[in-house]
Image (tube, rainbow, N blue to C red):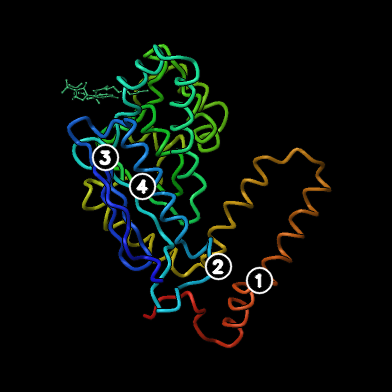
Amino acid sequence: MKQMNNPPDFELVDMDIDGPCVHIKINRPDKFNALNVKLISELCEAFEWTAKRSAGAIDAVHDESGEQYLRVLILSGQGKHFCAGADINMMRDAGANTPEENRKDSERLDKLFNSLWAHPCFTIGLIQGVALGGGAGLVSCLDHVIATENMRIALSEGKLGILPAVIGPYVYRKLGSAQFRRLAMLAGRINVSEAQRVGYVETIVPTLEDAIEEAQKVVSEVLTTGPSAVTLAKELTLGFDRWNGTDEELRNWTLDFTSRMRGSKEGQEGLSSFLEKRNANWKPEE
Ligand code: COA
């Protein structure tokens, strides 16, 4: 079966596959891409569908027919703003619902952020306009963020009398404890240069077109890295994030990880290709 056939059809999400890259575009511009139940469900499905077809998760560059598995996911939002956060109508209705329904709603949001955070592909965000609340959450879950000069970002929940709890772990990991705490309390928008200073943003460009061009440079770099190395770098980082054993246990864990990578199919191919002065099988033809 050809893996890339029949991608799911969405109403509020556009998904374009171009070889090893998938571009997922949030398409609810009349509400500034606010995350309602339908949009959250569609994004979760898009992340799940693409994760299952990623080279890193499958540990192969292409299927039997030669069709490439996915290695890079680009996320962007249609219109003036990247994302105005969770849909405020949805959150108000959830608060008035039973505790079980209210929790189900938060679980849906949690799945959204976690499936982007844990996605096996290298993820790049193209961010314009505002990224508020859940929008800042999405930004924090990405591996590499390219923002336009007009970008503004906020953990704005505090202004609504709620807190950035569901997105918290990802923002905290991205910015660190002090900046997360400060920005959650201030809850106001910061501009793109401060966003870059605190660690939300890698590169600032004038327009979204420039962001797309800049993303291509990042894609070219990622495609020369082993796909499983990309995916497992996330597992390695999570191991450090969560470590609560002794330092000695940590050092042993890194030794096991290193041995596992050296002995892997991809590790053997990467090391052999270097010594044989040839391209590794995951490198695109020049
Ligand atoms: N949820 C639901 N609807 C939203 C929304 C959200 N998070 N953000 C914007 N909208 C809707 C507005 O209600 C409005 O709908 P209407 O056309 O039916 O009246 C429409 O999007 C346009 O918003 P508006 O405020 O009129 O536009 P603006 O250009 O003045 O401001 C924003 C745009 C995004 C800066 C502003 O709407 C805003 O601050 N939104 C709240 C974002 C927020 O706090 N999110 C965090 C949630 S935790």
Determine which residue is flagged by label 3.
128
Residue at figure coordinates x 31%, y 56% from the top left? 214
Q: Earlier in the sequence, mark 1 or mark 2?
A: 2
The answer to whether any part of residue 177 appears in the image is yes
- Amino acid under label 2? Asp
Of residues 36 and 72, which is closer to you in this image?
36
Residue 255's x, y, as percent?
77, 59
Q: Earlier in the sequence, mark 3 or mark 1?
A: 3
Residue 77's x, y, as percent?
27, 42
- Amino acid under label 3? Gln
Determine the image quadrant of residue 177. Answer: top right
**Dot 3 surroundings within 10 Å: few (below 14), some, or many (20 or more)?**
many
- Amino acid under label 4? Gly
Determine which residue is flagged by label 2.
59
**Dot 4 surroundings within 10 Å: few (below 14), some, or many (20 or more)?**
many
State yes or no: discs 1 and 2 in contact (Cβ < 8 Å): yes
- Residue 125 bears which disc, if any? 4
Query: On the rendered structure, is 13 left or right of 251?
Result: left
Measured in 3D between alpha carbons, the distance from the residue under mark 3 to the one under mark 1, in whole angstroms, is 40 Å
